[in-house]
Image: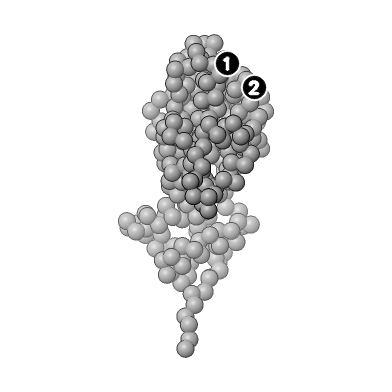
Amino acid sequence: MSIDILSTPDLTDDQFLRLSAFIQKNVGIKMPDEKRIMVQSRLNSRLKALKIKDFDSYLEYAFAPTEDGMEEIAHLINAITTNLTTFFREQPHFDYMTSNVLPEFAKKGLHRIELWSAGCSSGQEPYTLSIVMSEFMRKNPRAFREFSILATDISSKVLNKGLDAVYQMNEIDKVPFDLKKRYFLKSKDPAQQKCRVNKETREKVTFMRLNFMDSHYPISSPKNIIFCRNVLIYFNKQTQEAVIRKLIEHLVPGGYLFLGHSETIFGMNLPLVTVAPTVFKKL
């Protein structure tokens, strides 16, 4: 008896160029040749799920102007975009926010603080921001009346995970014990080894899909603080500046922009001043 095993095809030069051109244009992410194996590996799971035998057929299916094609583009983007994040990643940013930014806003008499986690991945960053804000207000009860956090990403897959707010216990290993106890709920099933962000912390965060390559960001209200960290590194310099410019259109004068530790605005003509490593204030 013979068994028909669906082989995993290779991504040819032409196929990769077609795919990378699409991603660059529509998502803004650079796709150099060294990413070909990664892309091939991730998309092979889509070929298997659809029972498609080669990449030519897959690309024709995905790029077809049909409802199925549009739905597959979302799966393609989910597969290709890299989502690496942890709670309290790059801790000095949260320390600066607590020791400098929030006290400054409190002295100004602001009653409401609005934050935006742009490129939020699976929710760890916006929930960290929610915890930081809650801790500051707990320790400074007269500082603010309320706060809200907008969390956006291009990947619907990670947005759904963020909305669920369920994480493996080892994902909160580095969270201080008192914060774990205050803001996380451990699964009652010890075999699960999972936890969930508590309701009060979750309710402060609103998730929304947003593509940085869109000409306009549908943000309803100006933000006091924007975190856009370790996202711009995937874009070329021109796209980086264009994205930052659109981001700070939604930042109040005197508001703060936080970028990733390896990101910079050097050489860009933007109304921002550096106040700390990768922390910028809008003029």
Which residue is more in the foreground, 110 or 131? 131
Residue 269 appears in view: no
Colouring rule applied to residues: one colour
Q: Tell me: residue 19, above or below residue 201.
A: below
131 relative position to 67: left or right? right
Task: Report x, y in % for residue 168.
Answer: 54, 47
Q: Secondary structure at mark 1?
A: helix
Q: Secondary structure at mark 2?
A: strand
Task: Report x, y in % for residue 179.
Answer: 57, 32
Q: Which residue is mark 2?
A: 275
Task: Report x, y in % for residue 186.
Answer: 51, 42
- Who comes first in sequence, dot 2 or dot 1? 1
Task: Report x, y in % for residue 229.
Answer: 58, 36
Which residue is more in the foreground, 147 or 182? 182
Q: How many marks?
A: 2
- Which residue type carries mark 1? Pro
Q: The C terminus is located in which quarter?
A: top right
Q: Tell me: residue 256, above or below residue 186.
A: above
Q: Which residue is mark 1?
A: 103
Residue ID at (56%, 19%): 139
Q: Tell me: residue 20, above or below residue 94.
A: below
Which residue is more in the foreground, 273 or 161? 161
Residue 45 appears in view: yes
- Which residue type carries mark 2? Val
The numbered disc on residue 93 is: none
Residue ID at (41%, 38%): 208
Which residue is more in the foreground, 136 or 102? 136
Per the model, the C-alpha gap separating discs 2 and 1 is: 15 Å
Residue ID at (48%, 41%): 196
Within-10-Å neighbours for mark 1: few <14, some 14–19, many 20+? some
Residue ID at (46%, 62%): 46
Write down the quadrant of residue 215 in the picture: top left
